[in-house]
Image: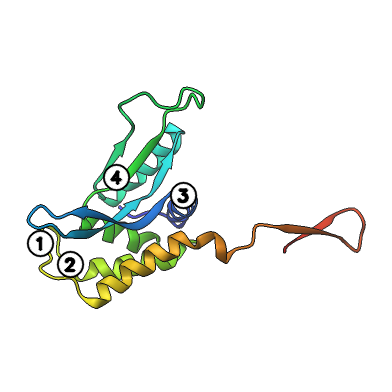
Amino acid sequence: MRLSEAQIGYLAGIVDGEGSITFVYHKCRTSRSKSAVAYVCPVANSNPLIIEAVTFLLDILGVRYAVHSPKREWNKKAKKRPYAVHIKGMDSAKVFLKVICESLRGKREQAELVLEYLERRKEGKRVKFVTDRDLQIIDSVRSLNRNYGALFPVETTREPSVTAEEDIVRSA
């Protein structure tokens, strides 16, 4: 079954606002070196209805995922239990990113780079060596995530409009 354009847009919006597309480093079991693993988390949120909506759409896509919530006591001041949905496996990450990539706004470049990285790999196969391009992709994605706020000014200014009834809000 396929998702509608509205459903794809919903998933892309959730990922742009509440999700993560990046790489994480893990210690390799067979050597002392670290290995990078693509990491896609469509949503981290405390609203169970949002988590339910995302997992419903992932089920339609046939994407494998896991829903995580801390086992230990969460922040009692917040009074909301946090949840995170994580995509499991390279093939599932490829399917998910291919579906939402064109609809992403803020994280499209990260998604395209992670897709390029994943396209050269096969599920369940160990990578014998990492190419220079792999390292470039990893560094680029991590840099994009670190410097995201620097690209978009947060300050806004208000200017009176021609008809004094409404203001025009512009980025500084």
Q: In which quarter of the image is the C terminus?
A: bottom right
- Can you give x and y, in whole percent of width and height, for residue 48 in the image? 42, 32
Judging by the rendered image, the residue that carries numbered circle 4 is 59
Which residue is the site of mark 1?
125
How far is the residue under mark 2 from the one under mark 3?
A: 27 Å
Q: Do the residues labelled 4 and 3 touch (CB within 8 Å)?
A: no
Residue 55 found in image quarter: top left
Nearer the observer: mark 3 or 1; the answer is 1
> Contact (CB < 8 A) between labels 2 and 1?
yes
Give the spatial CA distance, label 2 vs label 1: 7 Å
Q: Please say if the residues under marks 2 and 3 sit with CB atoms less than 8 Å apart.
A: no
The front one of 34 and 83 is 34
Of labels 4 and 3, earlier in sequence is: 3
Q: Do the residues labelled 4 and 2 touch (CB within 8 Å)?
A: no
Element at label 4: helix
Which three-letter amino acid code belongs to the residue tagged 2? Arg
Say which amino acid is labelled 3.
Answer: Ile
- Which numbered dot is residue 14? 3
First along the sequence among labels 2 and 3: 3
Q: Residue at x 70, y 57 (%)?
A: 155
> Would residue 68 appear left or right of 125 to someone viewing this image?
right
- Locate residue 25 relative to residue 150 in the image: left or right: left
Q: How far apart are marks 4 and 3 (CA)?
A: 16 Å
Closer to the observer: label 4 or label 1? Answer: 1
Q: How far apart are marks 4 and 1 (CA)?
A: 25 Å
Q: Which circle's residue, 3 or 1, is located before the other in the chain?
A: 3
Residue bearing mark 2:
121
Q: Which amino acid type is shown beneath numbered disc 4?
A: Asp
Q: In this view, does 36 lie above or below 132?
A: above
